[in-house]
């Protein structure tokens, strides 16, 4: 067992420290499970040097802009371009060379004029994180967490996931010359979702247990063997995901939108975006805070219930069920961080039905921009926030699309073939989706038949 | 039939003209079928003004670099950033606003150190066109062709394709407020490949005929109804695809690699890259020509046979069969253009087996970079070109990856489950792929079982 026999190395800090989100304990190193050594809650990364020497917003903006014409791999990364606000172990050229990057970030900001009209607002943009190298927002965090894993001497990284996390982890591990391990419950394997991790060479174990059993075993493994865990409680991942908000504000010429709306699953992304907004405000990069709102599927509404039933004091877990698989999480790890940033920015939390998700996804697609179902909850939620007048018609809104259309082609196909809600409780409600469906038509190969089809389509 | 009743508008030229690749006839407008009115061969786009006033290479390079820090949609496009070498109807702000763009291009150039070693060369890069908005190189051409279709007044665009072309066409049509029509033979529908076109709102007709029948009907349709054809003989598409080479050379600081290697299917992309190289040389942007080589699957080797059996004088069509579906084309439309640029740059044409494709795809994946099977022919072909000493060990090589890993998850899954060649003639030959396979392992949920698996994996 050559590589596994070395002692688990600690994570050393440089421009950053770890802070417990509950008891506030500060430390220079974190345990392998990334839990506070005193109280067991989650850690976040903090930058104590900003107290003494706050970087100037003008200097930062100019540096970030200039790096856009550089051809250096670290500047070409839409994450590391913002490294002044990221954990670093140093700035010397050899430090920068050790960064594992795939040119993540650099994602487009698309205007959605027709979705804006459908929601009843004037200005709507989509920040499309599904355009990342492995097709989801996870890449922005993984480049940071994988870099630190390798710097700490690890040759193995691991997570419990069958979806976007395992794909991203496997890609960055491969890129960095590390091995990766994916733990999934036996029988719960989704082959198409696993195809990426397999391609990038991950070792996949189907364990004879449920998902919580996989998570428990992962915790045990990272404590006992030199395997680094890349699940979303790894605070380095959240630091990388922060850059979504930095890049967005740069794209908007540092004029904050009134609202940013994000899907809520494990709530790491909401937490990261919120942290970025608060830090940007602290550093004077923006003059006012956008309201950050989180949308969940009705069938996976742990944060909605936590806020409603306990005022955000205690997590209400749920048995998650939704076709938006990327947010099918009943027990979100980062719920406390997310509750904090919602409160700090004045955002809302809303839930949407399966039919509302399917409708919103088709509307986004009709603008020429695909996304996975979980991303579409943002538009569906926006509509509800407009109805309850939380979002005003003249306000500017950015929805965050978190995953690529190609992550879940089955959803799209079943939708257009009218099979998505067949036999489900939503079957009647889904009749309203009929005008959005584009099932292929079988025709004789004649000009008349095709022209008649075009005429029909023009009327619909 | 309101929109279809207007007469088919002609395509007007501005900074460009159409030239027939066979008889050389020059014209300001093209027929709807994009065939030479005199001899029926393909058209290409040419820029007569370069004769009088050649743009200076220094001015172009500086302008292209500066546009990288612009936030204007036309500059954010990795295609239109190079608009000085593209067909334009004018440069006024309102002209530029009419461009239909999804921030295509801007694709990464990845180093592939392990694949380089495997091929026996020192320097290998991958230009990854699968990182485009709809996941394939088609987007770079479609932004130009869709823009001209709308400028000419069309409300409908169409193609015969079930794959990357229909996905890209449907996205740009939707983005530009046009409708799109996809023609496919009945029974030959691949649902997962169609999911994107459906999502973007395309109308899909399954015709009771074969693929050639679909193509014939499309030709008839565009002559008789105001529907614009976006198949690959549309020369505007090739102009957009040219920018792949411009962006690549910019990424290499205008130092040409010794070789560029591209998959060969319909041969539009090879033609476009070759055209770009010749134009860059003509304009003094590069001081020497890289050799452009084309790799085909053995089962779809029309260009290989055309060059070998007729010296490039006459197309040898084949009955195409390969799992690399994006290049499963027996009758490539742009064979004459491709044969020309191969000769002009001194490139080679090679074919590779299904097993070689699968191996190359797994090797690229193991670097943390996924691609669709058709893209992997480039690495497989490179190995053969090194063996026959056409590529020297010290030479620099760029392979073009044309499609995203997520375009064909089934291939990856079947590969890792050992099902890809089961029962086929390649079953024995594929035994050598065993070490690359990562089929998931079923285990008891114990620490010992997982650690034993990691130890096993380290030995393999």
Image: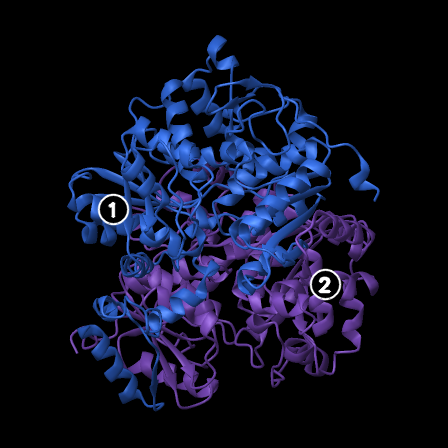
Chain colours: A purple, B blue
Pointer 1 chain: B
Residue drawn 81% across the image and 55% down it: A460
The image quadrant that residue B30 belongs to is top right
Residue B332: tell me if it is visible.
yes
Residue holding disc 1: B382
- Measured in 3D between alpha carbons, the distance from the residue under mark 2 to the one under mark 1, in whole angstroms, is 44 Å
Image vertical order of residue A319 relative to residue A452, above or below? below
Image vertical order of residue A455 relative to residue A157, above or below? above
The image quadrant that residue A18 belongs to is bottom left
Pointer 2 chain: A
The residue closer to the viewer here, B132 or A346, is B132
Numbered disc 1: secondary structure: helix
Residue holding disc 2: A437
Residues at discs 2 and 1 in contact (Cβ within 8 Å): no
Please rate how many residues cluster around mark 1, counting C-alpha atoms within 10 Å: few if below 14, some from 14 to 19, many from 20.
Answer: many
Q: Quadrant of the C terminus of chain B?
A: bottom left
x then y, percent, for residue A322: 63, 77
x then y, percent, for residue B5: 81, 38
x then y, percent, for residue B389: 15, 40
Q: Quadrant of the N terminus of chain B?
A: top right
Residue A346: tell me if it is visible.
no
Q: Give me the disc on residue A329.
A: none
A431 horizontally vs B248: left or right: right
B198 horizontally vs B372: left or right: right
Circles 2 and 1 on the same chain: no
Residue drawn 78% across the image and 58% down it: A391
Please rate how many residues cluster around mark 2, counting C-alpha atoms within 10 Å: few if below 14, some from 14 to 19, many from 20.
Answer: many
Numbered disc 2: secondary structure: loop
The residue closer to the viewer here, B21 or A145, is B21
The residue closer to the viewer here, B1 or B46, is B1
């Amino acid at each position: 067992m050559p590589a596994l026999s070395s002692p688990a190395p600690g994570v050393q800090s440089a421009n950053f420290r770890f802070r417990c989100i509950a008891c506030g304990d500060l430390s220079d190193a974190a345990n392998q499970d990334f839990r506070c050594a005193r109280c067991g809650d989650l850690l976040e990364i903090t930058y104590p040097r900003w107290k003494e020497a706050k970087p100037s917003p003008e200097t930062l903006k100019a540096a970030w802009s200039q790096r856009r014409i550089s051809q250096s791999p670290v500047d070409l990364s839409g994450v590391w371009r913002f490294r002044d606000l990221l954990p670093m172990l140093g700035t010397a050229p050899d430090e920068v060379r050790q960064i594992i990057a795939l040119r993540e970030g650099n994602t487009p900001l698309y205007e959605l004029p027709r979705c804006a009209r459908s929601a009843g607002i004037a200005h709507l943009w989509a920040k499309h994180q599904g355009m990342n190298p492995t097709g989801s927002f996870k890449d922005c965090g993984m480049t940071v967490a994988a870099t630190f894993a390798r710097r700490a001497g690890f040759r193995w990284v691991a997570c419990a996931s069958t979806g976007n996390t395992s794909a991203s982890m496997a890609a960055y591990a491969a890129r960095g010359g590390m091995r990766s391990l994916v733990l999934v419950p036996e029988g719960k394997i989704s082959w198409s979702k696993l195809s990426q991790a397999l391609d990038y060479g991950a070792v996949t174990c189907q364990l004879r247990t449920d998902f919580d059993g996989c998570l428990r075993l992962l915790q045990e493994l990272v404590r006992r063997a030199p395997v680094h865990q890349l699940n979303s409680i790894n605070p380095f991942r959240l630091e990388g995901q922060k850059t979504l908000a930095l890049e967005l504000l740069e794209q908007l010429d540092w004029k904050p939108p009134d609202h940013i709306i994000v899907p809520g699953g494990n709530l790491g992304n909401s937490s990261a975006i919120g942290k970025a907004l608060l830090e940007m405000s602290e550093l004077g990069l923006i003059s006012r805070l956008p309201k950050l709102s989180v949308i969940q599927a009705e069938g996976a509404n742990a944060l909605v219930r936590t806020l409603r039933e306990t005022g955000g004091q205690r997590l209400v877990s749920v048995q998650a069920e939704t076709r938006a698989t990327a947010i099918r999480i009943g027990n979100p790890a980062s719920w406390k961080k997310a509750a904090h940033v919602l409160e700090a920015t004045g955002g809302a939390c809303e839930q949407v039905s399966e039919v509302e998700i399917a409708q919103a996804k088709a509307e986004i697609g009709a603008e020429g921009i695909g996304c996975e179902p979980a991303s579409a909850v943002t538009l569906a939620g926006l509509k509800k926030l407009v109805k309850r007048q939380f979002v005003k018609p003249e306000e500017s809104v950015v929805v965050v699309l978190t995953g690529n259309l190609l992550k879940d082609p089955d959803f799209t196909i079943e939708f257009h073939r009218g099979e998505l809600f067949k036999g489900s409780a939503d079957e009647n409600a889904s009749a309203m989706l009929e005008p959005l469906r584009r099932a292929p038509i079988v025709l004789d190969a004649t000009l008349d038949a095709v022209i008649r089809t075009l005429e029909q389509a023009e009327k619909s």
